Every structure is written in C-alpha cells, then in structure tokens.
Amino acid sequence: MTVRRNLFQIWLVCVAMLQAFASGAQPVTKISSGWYHSLFLKSDGSFWAMGTNTFGQLGDGTYNKTNRPKQIVISNVTAIAAGYQHSLLLKSDGSLWAMGANSVGQLGNGTFNQTNRPGQVVASNVTAIAAGYQHSLLLKSDGSLWAMGDNEYGQLGNSSVNYYTNRPVQVEASNVTAIAAGDYHSLFLKGDGSLWGMGYNYYGQLGNGNGANVGLPVQIEASNVMLIACGGEHSLFIENDGSLWAMGNNGNGQLGDGSYNYHGINHPEQILASNVTAVAAGEYHSLIIKSDGSLSGMGNNSNGQLGNGTFNNTNLPGQIVASNVTAVAAGADHSLFLKSDGSLWAMGYNVAGQLGDGTYNQINRPEQIYVNPGYNIIFTRLLSGGIVQLSFFGNAGANYALDRSFSLSPANWIPQATNPAGSFGMLVFTNTPDPTTNNFWRIRSVP
C-alpha cells in the first residue's frame, strides 16, 4: 500500500497485509453488553460507550445514540455493568456511580429520575456490580450483598412487599463473593462455593427444581461453583473442574444441551464436562470460552449474535473463534469479546450502533472494532458473496472517491463511487473484487 497526496492504492488480493497494517492492538481490558448499548474500559483507565442512549445510559450528557465508541468523561473506572437501559460504574476508590433509566429506582440514588451523567450512588467499599433488566446488585468489601430497583418477582431477594426500592437494601450480611443479574432473577456465590438465587423462576432459571418465584435467596448448589452468568430467562455456571452447567428457558437452544425446550429446565444440567473458563448469557443466547482460548456459542442467532456466519439458531455449542479469546459479554441480541492482544470484536444486532463499527447494520461474523484509529487509515472486512468492504477514517464531512484499476503498469483509474465521511470521519465503500484480474483500489479526497 502506498500513500501519495492522500491517495491509497490497495490490492485487495492482499487482504491479510492490509488488515495487519490497520488493526493495531486496541488495549481494551473489560467489556459489558446491555440491551442495545455496550461499554468498555481501556488499559489507560478511560471509559467508552456506544449504542442507544435514550435514557442517558451512555453517560455523555446527551440522549443521542452513537455507532462509534465514545469516550465518557470520568476517570479511574475499574468495573462496568450494562443493564437494559441503565449502566453502573465502579471506581478505584470503591465508589459506585450510575446513569440512565431510573423509573423503578435501579440507579439506587434515592430518586426515580433518569440521568445522562454518571452520579455517585455509594461513596466507598463497593467491590463488584451487576445490572439486570431494571434492577441492580452490588457487593461490598465486607462480603455483604445489596440490591435496588425492580422487585416485582423477588429479584432483590429481600422478601419486601414493595415492588421496587430506589436505595440499596441489604440482602446478605457477609460471605458473598460474586453476583449476576438477569432480566428478573439474580444469582450469587458464597465463599464456600455455594450457589444461591432469587426472583423470577417460571422457566426454572433458579435451578431449584420447580417453577415458583422466590423472594428470599434459595440455595441451588452446595459447593464447587466458581463462576456465574444470568441471561434473560436462563442461567449458567462453571464448577471448579471446568464443567459447564445450565438451567432455565431453552426455547432457542441457549442451554446447549441439544434440545429446544421452551418450558425450560428447572434443575442444573451439565453441558460440558471440562475446560470451560468463562461464560456470558444474553437474552436468548450463550457464549463460552474454553481453556484453549476458543470461543463457542449456542442459542438464538436471528441477528448473527453467535458470529458463525449464519442466522440459524443452534442448540449445541459451536465454535466461533479458534483461539486467543480472553473475555466475552452478551447483550440482548449482540455479542462482544476480547482477544489476547487487547483487540475488541463484535457481532450481532446493531440497530442502535451497539457494535460500534460506524454502521447500523447487523453482522453475523466477528468484526474488529476500532477505537480512535486515527486519520487516513483503511481497513477491510470480507462479507458474504466475495464482497469486500473498505472502511476509511478521514476528515468528518469531507468527500472521498473510490477508484479501481486492473493494473498499475500503467494505472487506469476508473471512478466507482463518491461518499462523504460521517461525523466521526468514517466512510464505508462496498464492492466485489475479482482476484483473477488483479484489482487495485484507491481512496482519494475530492472537492
């Protein structure tokens, strides 16, 4: 690839070389997926968000959605949690901050007012956070569990007759080590490895053997549980031996047991016997990381959220990426994951820009998300049918043309299209190269 007077000549047969040039490692360290928004942290401590912002859940002081990662002005964030229409942040001093929808008190700030800027909820001693559909959980340094927001089905676990609370209420006094929040149910672990749950249980997502809702914590497993995840109406957990277990709604195959049981499974069933290191549960899909760094998924795939190149549901775990995956997050119908080089990848539903790729188009293959890539950078994405998509970061609002030539000796550039760069300086060209004719392409600025 050569650069002359803002000209970029690209031989699309050499896609790998182009991708290597443009895909410098993105130092993303943590990710979280909400309903239609996504959050992540970078290694420099900066906090970023993209997607829908109707209730201020991105925390940027507006109510405008964005389809590119946007840095939010707040420092020292160490943990993030994205709910349905609200977001939670944990800072290095142990303080809890929140923004977004608050109609049932899910922000825990003593009001029922939404906010589009992060506001402090708890001043110190918070060590972990989880955000559900309209409720929130927090863990303190003394091992106590606290909850706020919607409690219609008992998901706060305090047996209160109130349907909601706008201040954190204590659920457990000590010994809680991990928390997870689904649509209307909650899970937590204790120091002895026991698994507990409360809330909505129609599909058996609490795994206690029946379908009755639970307003106080009920024990599900007595020991050996080390990691938990709550989906919309299903639950996943990993035991110390690396085995994966699941329960709840299985209408889309999200439990991964080879069946489609809409009425659900009301007790934990083993899905994989070993080597599972991390899981994430979306609304109706599930994602798994194994000890070899591979990423697999199962369940609903109507928007490509499994990233396997199809839009077909699957009821067994299917491999998506073969290696180097280190973290995963599942939203309602989209998915995020990190690779060992710190790069951020996404797939699935994108109606609000929650993938952060500069478009509002769903995608059924993992695509790398570029965070502040700089100017005059081109990267490629292979689409179905042999189509190649060129994305270019230039000056916002400027016009750029895509030209093609079958040779460089001499070059005969034929104009193909002219597009303006968007508000972030990004523009996208899509075309079908023919490797047999040695297609060369360039992007150039035009008046």
Image (tube, rainbow, N blue to C red):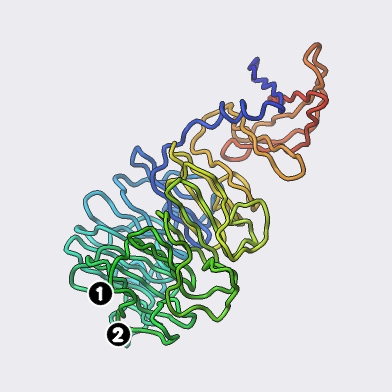
Question: Circle 2 sits in a helix, a strand or a loop, which is it?
Answer: loop
Taking the spot 71% from the left edge, 24% from the top edge, the residue there is 11
The image's mark for residue 160 is 2
Of the residues shown, which amino acid type is indicated by label 1? Val
377 or 13, which is in the foreground?
13
Q: Which residue is mark 1?
A: 169
x%, y% of residue 426? 61, 37
Task: Identify the residue at horizontal 31%, vertical 71% (top origin).
Answer: 195
Spot the residue most to the front. Answer: 273
- In the rendered structure, the answer to whether residue 320 lies left or right of residue 429 reads left
- Tell me: residue 353, above or below residue 133: above
Separation of marks 2 and 1 at Cα, in angstroms: 10 Å
- How many residues crowd around disc 1 within 10 Å: few (fewer than 14), some, or many (20 or more)? some
Which kind of residue does numbered mark 2 sit on?
A: Ser
Where does the N terminus fall, quadrant-wise? top right
Q: Which residue is more in the foreground, 190 or 369?
A: 190
Q: Residue at (63%, 56%) from the top-left corner?
A: 304
Task: Please state which of residues 334 and 238 is positioned toward the viewer in this rendering.
Answer: 238
Q: Residues within 10 Å of mark 2 (few under 14, many from 20)?
A: some
Say whether residue 196 is left or right of residue 185.
left
Q: Quadrant of the C terminus?
A: top right
Picture coordinates of residue 169, whole percent (x, y): 25, 74
Circles 2 and 1: CB distance less than 8 Å?
A: yes
Mark closer to the chain start, 2 or 1: 2
Instruction: Please name the residue shown 21% across and 68% down the image.
Output: 144
